[in-house]
Image (cartoon, grey):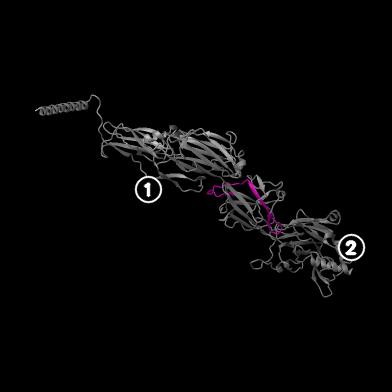
Amino acid sequence: MKKAKRFLTGLLSAALALSLCAMPAMAEEGSGATTTPTANPVWTETEGSITIHKYEWNNTERGPATGEEEDKNHLPSKTVEGGEDEKPTPLAGATFTVYQVKSADQLKDYYNGKAVTWPTSWRDYAEKDATTGGYKLNSKASSGPSVIKVGSKTTDVNGIVQFGKVQEEVLHLGLYLVLETETPDSVKTACEPFFVSVPMTKVLGDTNGGLTDWLYDVHVFPKNSTAYGQADLQKVGKQSGTDEEVLTMQGYKFKLYKKNDDGTWTWIEKKPANGVDNAGEWLDAANETGVLTTGPEGKISVSGLTKGVYAFVETGVNAEDGYILDSGIAYVFKISDNGEMVAATEADVEGAKKPEENVKSFDTTAFNETEVKVKNYKPDFKKEITGKKDADYGIGDDVPYTLTVNVPENVAKLKTFTVSDEMNSDQLVVNNDIVVKGVKVGEAVEKKFEEGTEYTLTPTTDTGKSGFTIAFDTKKIAEYAGGTITITYTAKLQDKASVGEVGNVNSADLKYSKKTDIKTTEEDPPYDIHDEAVVYTFKTGILKKGDSADGEPLENVEFTLYKKVDPQKDKINEAGTAVTFMGADKTILTPAEAKAKKLNVTDGENEPKWFAVMPLKTGKDGKAVANGLPNGEYKLVETKTHEGYNLLTEPVDANLTLDYTTKWDDTKTFDETGKLIKHDYNTTKVMNGDTEYKYAEIVIINRKGFNLPTTGGFGTLLFSGIGVLLVVAGVGVLLSLKKKNRA
């Protein structure tokens, strides 16, 4: 009997102990105080109460355990890293379930030393609940008739819950088992179950251990060890066509969600407080909307998170960067019981609802041991002429263009992915020779796309414009994600093209969705990468004058303009007998012909090859102009001159060896309209050697000569008369000499 009494005394004392979660609030038999209770207790009440004060606790110290409410004023301080010690923090959200395991009569009989079956440990009744992390009745206790459930309650923001004397709730006297059946997410481990006797000893008496009073309203202070975690996110930018990752992704917005037990999600705007999510400070102190924003290094760090399954969802991007918002992915991770950021599994989100309407999938692979890595993509685009941004051609030539698209890795999710090309039809007209090809990542073989399959082609019909629009089927080109698409075509340079230092500008645009899986609207236009190329054409000409530089202009003087064959630029036929120039085939002169026209010194095989470009004839102003020529070496050969003047004996140099530099506006970031201007034509600087080029005619002077007179003309009669006179004079001289000789 003395042994049983010692157990009860120990039980009552230990029930009030300020225990850690890992230590039971109930003492096992033989532990605790050894004071013997007085027999035949006199109870003045028939009911009582149990008030639970729940606290966060990460220390090993204990406070007083009298069962009185004033024990809360004597709680030991908890150690705070890097700061002053603080009192334990009340813990809300802990659910306790109370069971009566012995009635008032059984409790009184026990005090009186009668033979009563008594629990030896809470393990006789309870076991760990793997689902909730708390405790539950075991199968034996659940089926037993002696266990009566009083109820389940959850601690409030002050960490308090009371059983009995609350809203007419009656808690009869007896022995009670208290189970922490559910814990808030901040708790590492639930407190082990404990017994509470109602009433219990209020005051220990003299040295003989006599009980002087009973406590009917019992206050207990169970505690939990808690842990809070930190979630880190790294924002990364990836432009297709490069391997470089951009880490300075500032101004990207995210929401943080936590999965609930029913598979729904709660937007976490604030840190937990007293065991309750969203009850404390804002996650982002600078942003009281709950939206998280990446800093200069593209990072987000969120501290003070309780254990559970979380997901980052991207809600906004920096429009000036041109990266695609992928709000269709929820990037999932977990905060462990110990507050560590760990990887989630597919099982963690199985059957879960979507955090937001736009979310299409969960990504459990974005976590890489230390952080969630979220990558945004954007394409790249350029327009060129034979591999250059500017080039020179002749009027009538087919100018070859190439449009290069670096396909983003998430192209399959885009609603809009189109290329448009436009030019002034007075300057250039697109030929019907458009070819579209794709190259996959890591491969070298191009595949030709088929119109109507991978893309649709729409010619430009606007007045004064020539061009086309290609709309890609993003699902059909998904296999080329991260690869390259090229569009090649030619455009014919027109007679009305700008000639000289002013270029013929033509532009192209790649338009793509700002968001994945979201239909682009007029209020939300796509991004636009705008690029331009310029084709130049020049002219050469003559001013024909007679006698001197101040002479009168000579009309109807004829020339032929010849060009030296440029093997690198001119299109020579397979036979090597002709070139395609200014839209027509031109016959290459034979070596003998080139020598005869004094274009070459000899007719050797190594001499340059020439072909006739066009004939020229001076007008009344003495001028003749050859418009629309590319750079090259040219010569003018005079074939007919003005009456009374001699033909030029040598060709005249008319070379166009101009060095042009196109001035572009600086590359701009994507503006609020979503447009990036990579190259915007401004002006052109053209140099002729060391001198800035300004067109001027080549002044050619013809000199008057002694031309043979025409047959039957005055000159013939004159010379005939002089001859007759000379003959007569000669005859006279001969006759005179003969007379002298005779004499």
Q: Amino acid at mark 2?
A: Val
Counting from the top left corner in percent of width and height, residue 487 is at 54, 38
Which residue is more in the foreground, 434 or 644? Answer: 644
Q: Residue 319 lies in magenta, yes or no?
A: yes
Residue farthest top in this picture = 712
- Crowd rating for badge 2 (residues with CA inside 10 Å; few <14, some 14–19, many 20+): some
Q: Amino acid at mark 1?
A: Asp
Q: Nearer the viewer, mark 2 or mark 1?
A: 1
Residue 284 quadrant: bottom right
Q: Quadrant of the N terminus?
A: bottom right
Q: Is residue 499 left or right of residue 296?
A: left
Counting from the top left corner in percent of width and height, residue 341 is at 67, 56
**Of helix, strand and loop, which mostly describes the magenta segment?**
loop
Q: Is residue 523 visible?
A: no
Residue farthest right in this picture = 115
Q: Is residue 133 above or below residue 695?
A: below
Q: Which mark is residue 116?
A: 2
Q: Is residue 628 left or right of residue 110?
A: left
Q: Which residue is mark 1?
A: 690
Q: Is residue 598 left or right of residue 11?
A: left
Residue drawn at x 67%, y 52% as measured from the top left = 333
Residue drawn at x 46%, y 42% as measured from the top left = 390
